[in-house]
Every structure is written in structure tokens, then in C-alpha cells.
Image: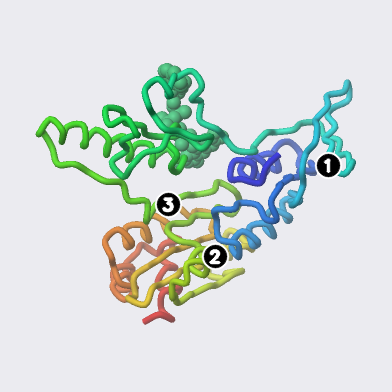
């Protein structure tokens, strides 16, 4: 249930269990799964998922799930029935705020979490919120980052430190599917929506030796660059996307131009996934 990153990770994990041959279906309510990720890259990941025996169905509303002696029945709105041995709920997480008496503390919150400013301060200036309970991005290292920002601001009030503000402009994320989908920064869809001019370099079904050697058919990349030659967003389908994403994250945080990034990566150890970066960036030189 749900076409978010947790469902995709569980589906790819389940596809590799036992003898294989299991039928896996992701049921997503929206018109496309993985909403915050790049639409074009998501459709490539869906192709790869199909090859693993994972079916992705969109625009599906689940009305009920019933347990029987022989398994489970998922009933969709409209009456269609699907039988399954196992149903996994990946339809999103909500912060566990009910027992915190937030109203008594004058702390504004919604179903998405506790509202905070860029210093992680809530509507009650004496209270800070960080991590999954805050209405921000729900990722492990984002929680750590927010915690450090809050701590700095608490110490700043005591005159012991400089204050700090969060910047979510270069938050990396990796979906642990096969191939992995790693992204940092903006999606092409968001750039279009916000009318931000960009150049795009894109490649799919990459036949570079790094991927040919391991037989990966669905490797792909998309790098989005602004009119100042700085990186706006980067997206990779790779068997090991983290190094690429981290390299691009550093470039974004440091404001590195694509030309400098090319030169700085000529000596990336070969044949790692990162050593392919110069092939990607070359058209932008
Ligand atoms: C299946 C799954 C896969 C994920 N994969 C990734 C991933 O690959 N990469 C990534 O970056 N993030 C991933 N995440 C998200 C990541 O786990 C969270 O963003 C991160 O754990 C948030 O940290 P946190 O400290 O805010 O909350 P948590 O890690 O949830 O910690 C909160 C703690 O507070 C305790 N607690 C709750 N209420 C109270 C209370 N009233 N009093 C005292 N203690 C309380 C809880 O028991 C818990 O121990 C994943 C999440 C899930 C569910």
C-alpha cells in the first residue's frame, strides 16, 4: 500500500527473497508514485522495477483489507479485489504527537508535524522541534542536522555560540532499490513549475564499463544546471548511487561550477561510479 520510497524498497527486497517468482504489486493513490522524486527518473525506475516482477498501479483507492484463513483480500474502491499472502503498509508516516499536549504549550502543529522556523524554533519560543516530529523532511541525517541547528540556537541565546539556520537546498536522498535512485536538489518538474531556467544533461541505459561489467541495464543520470553554471539538481539510477549524490551535494553546498566539478573529478578513482561523472559533465564544458 502506497507508492513511496519505503514501499519501493520493501518491494525490491521482497523480489529477491526465496526462490523468486513472487508477484509484487504497489498500489498508489496518486497518478504517479514517488511524488517528491523526478518524474522522468521515476518512470525509468518503474521500468527497472517491472523487470524485477514488481507491478506498479496508480490511481488506486483501497477501501478495505480483509484477513481470511488463506490470506488477505484487498478491496479497491469500485469493487476490484486483489488477493495476497502479505500486505505491507507503506502509505506514509505521521508524527506521533498525540500525547505531547502541544496545545497546552502553545505549539502550532498539523498532521504533517510541528511547525518550526529556520532555527527549528516552534511557535512557543522556549520550545524547539527536530527530526520526524517537525513538519520538515523525514530523513535520518536531516534529523541530526536539525538537532545541531537547534542546539546552536539554544547556546546562542546563552551567548555561548553563533546561531544557525537550516538550509534544505541540497538534501540528498537514496532509495535503496535496484538500481538505487539517488537524488539531491531540485527535480526537473519543480524547475518547470517554478519557471527556473535550466540546462539538462541526461542519459539512460548507460553502457559504460562500470555498469556493463555488472550487467546493470537501467543505469541513468540527469543533472540540472542553472544559468550561472551551478548545479540545481542531480539524479542517478545506479547500483551504487551514494557516492555520486554525495559528490554533487558537496558541489551544490560549495557553489562549484560544472567546469570546476569536471576538473576536480578527472582523478576520481577508476573504475568507480564517480569516475563516470566526467562523461556526464563533458557536454556542459
Ligand atoms: C522503513 C523506514 C525506512 C527508512 N529509511 C531511511 C533511509 O534509508 N534513510 C534515511 O535517512 N531515513 C530513513 N528513514 C527515516 C528515518 O528513520 C527517520 O527520519 C529518522 O529516524 C528520524 O529520527 P528522529 O530521531 O526524529 O525519530 P526516531 O528515529 O523515530 O526516534 C524517535 C524516538 O523517540 C521515541 N519517542 C517517541 N515518543 C516519545 C515520547 N513521548 N517520549 C520519549 N520518547 C519518545 C521513539 O520511541 C524513538 O525512539 C526510514 C524510515 C522508515 C520507517
Q: Specify how the rendered protein is coloured.
A: rainbow
User: Where does residue 185 sit, x and y in percent of width and height?
Assistant: 42, 59
The secondary element bearing badge 1 is classed as: loop
Q: Compute the Cα span from label 3 to label 2.
A: 17 Å
Please name whichever residue, 180 or 88, is drawn nearer the observer in this view of the structure: 88
Say the numbered circle drawn on residue 189: 2
User: Disc 1 and disc 2: Cα gap in Å?
Assistant: 29 Å
Q: Residue at x 55, y 72 (%)?
A: 203
Query: Which residue in the structure is indicated by mark 1?
Result: 77
For marks 3 and 2 on the same chain, the one whose residue lies earlier in the sequence:
3
Quadrant housing the C terminus:
bottom left
Instruction: Determine which of the numbered discs, if any, sits on residue 114 in the image.
Output: none
Q: Which residue is mark 3?
A: 172
The residue lying at 10 percent from left, 33 percent from top is 160
The furthest residue to the left: 159
Residue 46: x and y in percent read 68, 57
Residue 84 vs residue 127, the one in the foreground: 127
Residue for point 28% across, 72% down:
260
Q: Please state the total of marks drawn on the protein image.
A: 3
Instruction: Give the percent coordinates (x, y) of residue 59.
Output: 75, 51
Task: Compare residues 171 and 55 and report the one nearer the observer.
Answer: 171
Residue at (54% x, 65% y) in the render = 189
User: Closer to the N terminus: mark 3 or mark 1?
Assistant: 1
Q: Is mark 1 within 8 Å of ligand 1?
A: no
Viewport quadrant of the N terminus: top right
Indicate left or right for 247 with 190 as reference: left
Label located before the other in sequence (1 or 2): 1
Pointer 1 and pointer 2: residues touching (CB < 8 Å)? no
Disc 1 crowd rating (10 Å Cα; few below 14, some 14-19, many 20+) is few
Q: Nearer the viewer, mark 3 or mark 2?
A: 2
Name the secondary structure under disc 3: strand
Amino acid at each position: 500500500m502506497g507508492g513511496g520510497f519505503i514501499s519501493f524498497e520493501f518491494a525490491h527486497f521482497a523480489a529477491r527473497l526465496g526462490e523468486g517468482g513472487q508477484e509484487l504489486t504497489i498500489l498508489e493513490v496518486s497518478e504517479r508514485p514517488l511524488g517528491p522524486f523526478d518524474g522522468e527518473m521515476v518512470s525509468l525506475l518503474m521500468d527497472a522495477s517491472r523487470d524485477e516482477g514488481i507491478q506498479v498501479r496508480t490511481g488506486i483507492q483501497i477501501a478495505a483489507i480483509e484477513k481470511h484463513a488463506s490470506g488477505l483480500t484487498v478491496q479497491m474502491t469500485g469493487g476490484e479485489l486483489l488477493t495476497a499472502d502479505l500486505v505491507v503498509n507503506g502509505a506514509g508516516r505521521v508524527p506521533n504527537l498525540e500525547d505531547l499536549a502541544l496545545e497546552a504549550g502553545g505549539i502550532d502543529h498539523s498532521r504533517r508535524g510541528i511547525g518550526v522556523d529556520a532555527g527549528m524554533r516552534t511557535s512557543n519560543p522556549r520550545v524547539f522541534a527536530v527530526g520526524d516530529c517537525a513538519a520538515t523532511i523525514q530523513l535520518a541525517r536531516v534529523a541530526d542536522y536539525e538537532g545541531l541547528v537547534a542546539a546552536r540556537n539554544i547556546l546562542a541565546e546563552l551567548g555561548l555560540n553563533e546561531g544557525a539556520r537550516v538550509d534544505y537546498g541540497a538534501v540528498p536522498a537514496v532509495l535503496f532499490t535496484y538500481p538505487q535512485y539517488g537524488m539531491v536538489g531540485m527535480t526537473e518538474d519543480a524547475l518547470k513549475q517554478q519557471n527556473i531556467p535550466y540546462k539538462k544533461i541526461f542519459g539512460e541505459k548507460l553502457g559504460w564499463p562500470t555498469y556493463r561489467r555488472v550487467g546493470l541495464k537501467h543505469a541513468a543520470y540527469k543533472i540540472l544546471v542553472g544559468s550561472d553554471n551551478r548545479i540545481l539538481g542531480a539524479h542517478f539510477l545506479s547500483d551504487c548511487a551514494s557516492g555520486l549524490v554525495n559528490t554533487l551535494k558537496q558541489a551544490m553546498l560549495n557553489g562549484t561550477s560544472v567546469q570546476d566539478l569536471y576538473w576536480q573529478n578527472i582523478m576520481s578513482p577508476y573504475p568507480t561510479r564517480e569516475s563516470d561523472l566526467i562523461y556526464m559533465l563533458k557536454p556542459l564544458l
